[in-house]
Image (cartoon, helix red, strand yellow):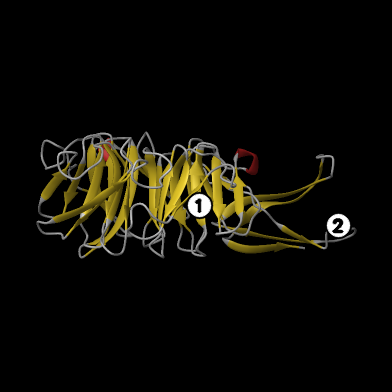
Amino acid sequence: MLSVCVDSNGIKWFGTDKGLSSFDGVKWSTYTTEEKLADSTINKIVFEQTSYGPEIWLATNNGVSVMGITPDAVTCATPYRKGNTGLVSDTIYAAAVDTGHVKWFGTDSGVSTFDGDNWETYTVSDYLSNNIILDIGTAQDGWNFLGTKGGGVSRIRSDGIDAVTAASPSDTKWSGIVSDSVYAVYIDSRGVQWFGTDKGVSMHIGDKTKENWITYTTEDGLVNNFVLSITEDKNGVKWFGTLGGVSSFDGTNWKTYTAEDNLAGNIVYDIAVDMDGSLWFATNGGVSHYSGNATSVGTVSSKVFSYYVTARVYPNPFNMETTIEFSLPVKSSIAVVIYNIMGQRVRELLKTVLPRGMNIKG
């Protein structure tokens, strides 16, 4: 699982190396090159609300696809490729939509933009510090931050018509960023810039290239220094997907989740925030869902929705009777089983289908 996105209708979209899957809470749907996808490997999914309706843009290994995603229909347009558009390359690693609805596509040969009518391309011959663009983060003030392979971060802004402004790159030579290979870029709700690298995550405040940098590594609480994805939940907590699991940081405290906590896989390629504030993780072992009030992370299969549920049990310990509370993200088949402290199965209390939401077993 390479990428994940939640659209305005709450539908989850999962990019894989074998196509695109969606999950509406009940039903799974899958799209491949047979449905006109540009390629089966979906590296990034970006949602955009347009005047025509909601759309998702897909960055693939063989061009760009755009899909209209109204609740009752999904339409896929003819793929955008180098041969029929102004794309600089068909190998697309990153995608973003800025505040002016300009689409940005990071490739192995530079970055290309599309405003709905015109294509433009920028490379090291223009403003970029490196042509390999691994991720793109957009800020509310119109600036776009391009994470590169070996050139740090390039900052660039388009007026959506015919002018582009660029700033000095943030690299290890001229700034406080910890590495010049930047795999994840995220601009948070306060405008603070977060850059995930192969040597930790660097935070930057403001627009002065040389000032206000802080780097966090495993010595601070990050689970692994190779950071592939970054996002912010509805409480302002930052989440970092790495090669060794996922870590959260609330500004003071770090928490970490790995496969030992039921994370589907320890390589976390992408993270998305759902409409209810929960989190979805795209990993090398599948998709995981985190509700925000559990001590572990549930696992989701692309064919069968399965997961672990953390329950609240009271009183605990109990003797003759107890109450078990748990919440389900979707209508599901559920089993409630009691084990003793030796890990031995004692009794199956419940095995049935229950609705989404809070459930109580007394």
Amino acid under disc 1 = Trp
Q: Which residue occupies the extreme right position in the image?
A: 319
- Secondary structure at badge 2 equals loop
Q: Position of residue 3 (x, y in %)?
A: 40, 44
Q: Is residue 184 left or right of residue 350?
A: left
Circle 1 sits on which residue? 239
Task: Report the front residue among 278 and 99.
Answer: 99
Circle 2 sits on which residue? 317
Q: Position of residue 61 (x, y in %)?
A: 28, 34
Task: Report the front residue among 282 and 97.
Answer: 97
Amino acid under disc 2 = Pro
Crowding near the residue tagged with mark 2, few <14, some 14–19, many ≥20 C-alpha atoms within 10 Å: few
What residue do we see at 44% from left, 37% from top? 198
Q: Quadrant of residue 48?
A: bottom left
Q: Position of residue 144 (x, y in %)?
A: 27, 54
Q: Which label sits in the foreground, 1 or 2?
A: 1
Q: Is residue 267 above or below residue 337?
A: above
Task: Report the front residue among 319 and 228.
Answer: 228
Q: Is residue 192 left or right of residue 108?
A: right
Q: Is residue 318 left or right of residue 245?
A: right
- Mark yes or no: residue 88 visible: yes
Crowding near the residue tagged with mark 1, few <14, some 14–19, many ≥20 C-alpha atoms within 10 Å: many
Number of the label disc, if any, that sits on residue 87: none
Q: Quadrant of residue 184?
A: top left
- Mark yes or no: residue 56 visible: no
Q: Quadrant of residue 173?
A: top left
**Mark 1 vs 2: CB contact within 8 A:** no
Tell me which label, 1 or 2, sits earlier in the chain. 1
Residues under labels 1 and 2: Cα distance?
34 Å
Q: Position of residue 329 (x, y in %)?
A: 55, 57
